[in-house]
Amino acid sequence: MKLSIIKLALWLVVLLLITGGFVPAINENRKPDGSVQEGLKNPQTFVPQTLQDKDPKVKKENIPFSNRSIRGERSFRPIIQNAASRHDIDPALVKAIIMAESDYNPRAVSKKGAKGLMQLMPVTARSLGVDDAFNPEQNIHAGVRYFKTLLRQFDGDEKLALAAYNAGSSNVRHYKGIPPFKDTKRYLKKVYRYYDFYKNGS
C-alpha cells in the first residue's frame, strides 16, 4: 500500500514537471515584500470602464496615461475649469493640450526651453505676465489665454490654432495651413485622441 502511494506521488511530480505545473495565469504585480497585487500588467494604462462601454474599439494600449497624468488631471481640474470658462474654451480640449504637451508634469522642460504644464516658451510666458512658468495656476491660465489668442488669429479654426501652438503662428501663416512637419501632424493626432477621451470618458 505504501509503495503504491509513493508511486502515485512520483507520477504526480513527473506530470507536473512535464506540463510545467499548469496554473491559471493571473494578471498580477509583485510588491517589494514579495506579496502579490492583482491588477493591470501595465499600471500606467488607464481607460474608464464607461469609455470602453461607449466605444468597444477603445483599447487600453491605445490611450496610455501615466499615474502622474491621472492624478494631475484630477488635481488641476479646478484650475482648468476656471481658465477654460474664463476664455470660453472647452475644458476637455485644455486637458488634451496639457496631456500632449507635458503629461501633466508641472516641472516639464522641453529641449527648446518650453516650461510647465502647457509648455510655455520663456518669451511667450513673459508676454503673458507669467512670473513662474512652473506654477500650475499661472501656467494654465496663460496657456489657455494664449490658445484663445491663436484662435482669434486664425478666425476660430481650432486645428490651425493647435498647429500654431505647436509650430508657431508664423509657420502656419507661411504654409497657409497646417505646416508639413511630422511633429506637428503627430501633435494634432495626439491632442484630438486625448480630446475624444476627455470628452467621452472623463
Image (cartoon, helix red, strand yellow):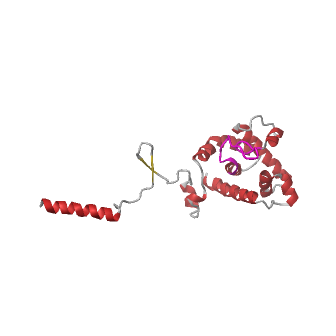
The quadrant the N terminus occupies is bottom left
- Left or right: residue 75 compared with residue 127: left
Residue at (60% x, 56% y) in the render: 63
> In the current view of this chain or complex, which residue is farthest to the left?
1
Residue extending furthest toward the top: 131
- As drawn, the residue found furthest toward the right would be 174
x and y, in percent, of residue 112 in the image:
76, 46
The image quarter in which residue 56 lies: bottom right
- Can residue 131 be seen at all in this image of the molecule? yes
Q: Is 144 or 66 nearer to us in this picture?
A: 66
Main SS of the magenta part reads loop
Specify the segment rendered in magenta.
Answer: 100-120
**Residue drawn where x is 84% and y is 56% of the image:** 172
The residue sitting at 15% across, 63% down in the picture is: 4
Q: Position of residue 52 (x, y in %)?
A: 56, 59
Quadrant location of residue 8? Answer: bottom left
Q: Is residue 154 visible?
A: no
Left or right, 189 with reference to 156: left
Q: How many marks?
A: 0
Find residue 173 and report its horizontal and vertical position in percent.
87, 56
Magenta stretch encompasses residue 93? no
Residue at image coords 82%, 50%:
150
Q: Position of residue 65 (x, y in %)?
A: 60, 51
Residue 70, placed above or below residue 179? above
